[in-house]
Amino acid sequence: MRIDVLTLFPEMFEGVFGSSILGKAKERGLVSLHTVNFRDYANNKHNTVDDTPYGGGGGMVLKAEPIFGAVEDVVTRRSGAADAADEGSRPPRVILMCPQGAPFSQRKAQELAAEEHLIFICGHYEGYDERIRRHLVTDELSIGDYVLTGGELPAMVVVDAVVRLLPGVLGNETSAVRDSFSDGLLEYPHYTRPVDFRGMTVPDVLLSGHHAEIDKWRRRQSLLRTLERRPELLEGAELTPKERAWLAEQRELSAKARPSLAEGAEDGEAAGESGR
Ligand code: 4GT
């Protein structure tokens, strides 16, 4: 996969694209990540990329020309490349990061991970000329209902979520499949050594060696945790009729009667994890 990010602040991406899993994916040739400063495409004396809005009012608006110029240059260079010249290369997704965009999600990350070429457009401080949205962009994405000073952090979030899904990027091929959200549920609790940390213990079932019991416990913990924290996710989750019935029972139990998730003990197995 190739990813180009159009930004006025390419240096913001150096750490994120060079470190950890993304850095390794790049080194191993699983993804190529590029930043493009669209100020280089401002065809005016002072290299301005923004201007005052028609109709007046405050603020500045990112001009269409530098963004169109940068995207067209990236697309032309890409289609000239040897690997893209092979038949079957798909046109890029051109993604505008903005608060008005469609909510970004694991599902969207999976969809984007199937593409060959992504182009991100990151504005800063101000809005975009509407013609960018209407005639250049294929997707508008938001990472949540809050306003930031620029689209750079949101673009990093989306790039990270997409690249880790590419084949070969995560060492353990199953780890992306077992993530929170990939089955529509939150993850079950994890424990590692020691069994007793300052009196806070690991649920017995995890030490039992009974894999069927462990799977059952984990699944129920996932269901309970989702019910408590993000009940709206249950509507879209893939659940068996049995699981739906069990959840309905749990819903009936009052918050008091239901063993707390923090105790890790839906079957009453763990005694103390009260150290919080
Ligand atoms: C929030 C988000 C985003 C911004 C988000 C144009 C100038 C937009 C600043 C930019 N804020 N972009 N993508 N929630 N701010 O995704």
Image (cartoon, rainbow, N blue to C red):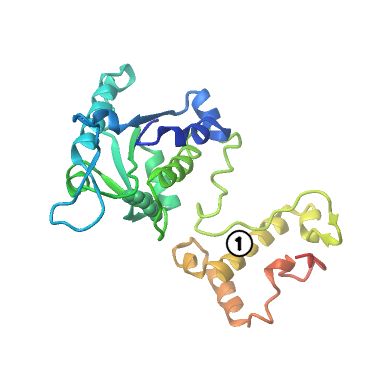
Residue 200 rendering spot, x and y as whole percentages: 82, 61
Q: Is residue 70 visible?
A: yes
Q: Is residue 142 visible?
A: no
Name the one closer to the observer, 103 or 242: 103
Tell me what residue is drawn at x 61 percent, y 76 percent: 250
Q: Secondary structure at mark 1?
A: helix
Tell me what residue is drawn at x 20 percent, y 29 percent: 45
Placement of the C terminus among the 4 image quadrants: bottom right
**For the residue marked with disc 1, what is the amino acid?**
Ser
Q: In this figure, which residue is indicated by the disc labeled 1?
A: 222
Tell me what residue is drawn at x 69 percent, y 61 percent: 217
Query: Please, is residue 217 above or below residue 19 in the view?
Result: below
The answer to whether 98 appears left or right of 131 in the picture is: right
The answer to whether 220 appears left or right of 160 in the picture is: right
Residue 222 rendering spot, x and y as whole percentages: 61, 61
Placement of the N terminus among the 4 image quadrants: top left
